[in-house]
Image: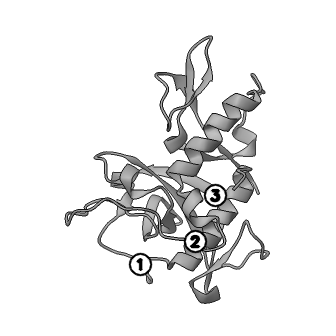
């Protein structure tokens, strides 16, 4: 991969999706702001996180990505909030999103859970899909009956306004079996034990 998944760190108050990664100074990992960053953009290493700090990041990512529901022998859909008004990019749905690349937007699957996604002005975690077949494997699962692959190493985040909510790809949503493959790919590339 030419990019690396990174989680920004900044001063802030800790919670499940912004776990503490340093008490001095008080820094939190901004889990919903995962970025696929080109390797050449990485600076020098500043500090290594200890096992407890990494565990808090792992627990938060498992929750945000619904991995505990999907990475098991019999996967189940991620829980979703009730209600009839859905005006946000939803978990398991596919959208054109992000900046224009060669005059077009790329296709992305929303992988953050809908309890997070439903909040106004949220950042949504997504995985890019491609019809240009890569080497098969857990990190590049075949989806849509083998017509596309998910690029799990390209997990990134976009704000709500970055999604085209009207012009949608076909299909517009992945089935549970495909989402389980994507979740297992995310667990592998992010180094999360399931």
Residue topped by disc 1:
172
Q: Earlier in the sequence, mark 1 or mark 2?
A: 2
Q: Earlier in the sequence, mark 3 or mark 2?
A: 2
Residue topped by disc 2:
75
Q: Is residue 100 left or right of residue 42?
A: left
Q: Is residue 44 left or right of residue 30?
A: right
- Number of the front mark, 3 or 2: 2
Estimate the x, y position of residue 137 in percent, counting from the top left: 78, 72
Residue ID at (64%, 67%): 72
Estimate the x, y position of residue 65 in percent, counting from the top left: 54, 55
- Residue 166: image quadrant is bottom left
Residue topped by disc 3:
154
Estimate the x, y position of residue 174 in percent, counting from the top left: 49, 77
Q: Earlier in the sequence, mark 1 or mark 3?
A: 3
- In the rendered image, the vertical position of residue 129 relative to residue 54, given as above or below: below
The quarter in which the N terminus is drawn is: bottom right
- In the rendered image, the vertical position of residue 82 relative to residue 42, given as above or below: below
Q: Residues within 10 Å of mark 1 (few under 14, many from 20)?
A: few
């Amino acid at each position: 991969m030419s990019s690396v998944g990174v989680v920004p760190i900044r001063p802030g108050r800790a919670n499940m999706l912004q776990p503490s990664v340093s008490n001095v100074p008080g820094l939190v990992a901004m889990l919903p702001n995962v970025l696929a960053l080109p390797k050449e953009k990485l600076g020098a290493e500043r500090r290594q996180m200890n096992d407890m700090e990494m565990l808090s990041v792992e627990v938060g990512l498992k929750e945000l990505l619904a991995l505990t529901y999907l990475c098991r022998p019999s996967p189940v859909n991620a829980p979703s909030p009730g209600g009839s008004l859905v005006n946000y990019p939803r978990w398991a749905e596919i959208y054109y999103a992000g900046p224009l690349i060669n005059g077009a937007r790329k296709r992305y699957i929303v992988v953050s859970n809908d309890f997070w996604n439903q909040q106004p002005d949220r950042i949504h975690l997504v995985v890019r899909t491609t019809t240009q077949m890569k080497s098969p494997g857990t990190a590049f699962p075949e989806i849509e009956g083998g017509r596309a692959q998910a690029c799990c190493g390209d997990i990134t985040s976009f704000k709500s306004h970055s999604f085209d909510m009207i012009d949608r790809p076909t299909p517009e949503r992945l089935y549970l079996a495909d989402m389980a493959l994507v979740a297992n790919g995310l667990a592998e590339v992010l180094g999360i034990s399931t």
